[in-house]
Amino acid sequence: MNWITIAWPMVASACLTLGLIELRIGLTQPPRAARLLFALSAFAVAGISGLELALTRADNLADWWPLMRWLDIAVGLMMVSLTAFIWVYFGTGSKWLALAVPGLYAVGLAFDYLPGSGMTYQQITGFRTVETFGGVTFNLAEGVPNPWNVFPYLAVLALIVFVVDASARLWRRGGRWRAAVVGGSIVLFFLVGGGQAALIETGAVQMPYLISWAYLVILVAMASELHADVLAAAQLASRLQDSEMVLQQLRSQLAHASRVSLMGQLASALAHELNQPLGAILRNAEAAELFLAQDPPDLDELRAILLDIRQDDRRASDVIERLRTLLKRRSLAPCALSVGDLLTTVAALTRGDAAARQTRLEIAAAPGLPLVMGDAVHLQQVLLNLVLNAMDAVGHLPAERRQVRVGAQRPDERAVEVSVSDGGHGIAPDQLGQLFEPFFTTKPHGMGIGLAISRTIIEAHGGRIWAENNGSDGATFRFTLPLVEESPAP
Ligand code: ADP
């Protein structure tokens, strides 16, 4: 086998390879028409390549004729798909020139299906074996040329003018690289391919069709476009990563701001919380003074009082510590934690506030709940926000009906669900979908970021947060937390 006969299959494989890559890109969501059209043209040229090779072997009309018909169809398909490709890919071009391409070609192609005629030759008179490319022999058909064969050439001419015009328009709009490389390669291909076909069909040269070889120019141009696209996509991905990081920082700043604002609301509650141990310390110190004044002083009583003072002091510093951790900006550090403990801490943090608002806070965790993966401080923030919102929602009710219930249960094997339920005004149905949007608030002095941040925190934990109206009145907010994964048995 000579190198020349291998060249066609090689051209076909190159077309198929790039065609498949383009098809793959074209079928991503949303589908890209330009890529699909280019893939179609590449597949058509792969077919042309095979047909061109087969034609060099045909030495009788029965073999030659169907091959030639298929070649004409494949060439038409290639021309139409390239025209449509340029139309979509460049986003510009003359509609009439684009429509002239299939119109003119169809007239020529019709001769293939008229009795006693063909697009290229009216009649085949015989076959000749010629030697070319340094000793390789090919079969060539000889016949009476069809004078109407001018139509496919007019179609090629229309295509060339269409591409030149579309490229010039794109060039003026700033797409110079694409106009020059893609537009230029297509024009070059049709000049070379069309020119060679014309020379063969007019009998000026005696050689097989090499249209598919010329298509390599387009393949190279499109491969370089693809390369540029891949590079651009990589740069875009890295820019996206950068903006994602900025967004993350903004979110964390926002979370911090919201914690500070929450703390504003909580300040009175915490002052109340601190007052208790401080008052107890004061009263114990006064009692100690009385015991010291006795003669002899009651040392046992004094020891008991000192112990009380120490415990109260620890309680006070615990409250301050909780405040400090809550105010500090931290990234997520999940570890195994008990939901029961979480609810107890939140109950302690909100007890003062609940008393000030004359709201009854009921905490009920189902027994035997498994440990969850979570960051205690962030989850406290979520729960605080939900409880304070619930207290807001029942604020307008008479004191005896102001009630907020916090519960924890296990809905399925994979998660624990925490719920905060109130008997307040509930949520307007049209607002249910917006509650977790940033800055959505119905309160005159609300910031509307509490729930948005809560959602960010819960989703970062791999959980889900949602709200629903209760059957009777009020609303329930729920979130899930994933369980600590059991380590596999050794
Ligand atoms: P803010 O409290 O600043 O308004 P949030 O993000 O905490 O911001 O809440 C957004 C909105 O969700 C509130 O303004 C309110 O309309 C609604 N909302 C939150 N919790 C409840 C609740 N328990 N009952 C009814 N509506 C609620």
Image: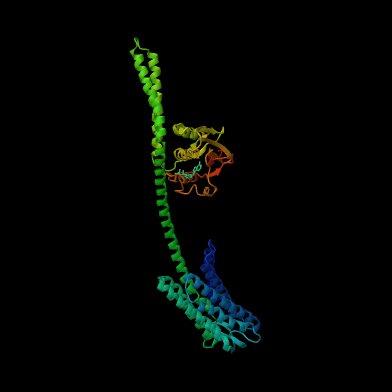
Can the viewer see residue 318? no
Q: In which quadrant will I find the C terminus?
A: top right
Tell me where residue 308 appears, x and y as whole percent.
Answer: 40, 21
243, 287: nearer the viewer: 287
Q: In which quadrant will I find the N terminus?
A: bottom right
Residue positioned 61% across, 88% down in the render:
122
Can the viewer see residue 285? yes
175, 131: nearer the viewer: 175
* 6 to 371, vertically: above or below: below
Direction top: furthest residue: 295
Tell me where residue 431 appears, x and y as whole percent.
Answer: 52, 48
* 490 to 430, vertically: above or below: above
Total marks drawn? 0
* 10 to 404, vertically: above or below: below
Tell me where residue 105 appears, x and y as whole percent.
Answer: 56, 81
Quadrant of residue 208 in the image? bottom right
* 229 to 134, vertically: above or below: above
Query: In the figure, is residue 283 to the left or right of 397?
Result: left
18, 313: nearer the viewer: 313
Residue positioned 60% across, 80% down in the render:
68
Quadrant of residue 116 in the image? bottom right
| Display coloring | rainbow
Tell me where residue 136 appears, x and y as whole percent.
Answer: 54, 81
Query: In the figure, is residue 70 to the left or right of 386?
Result: right
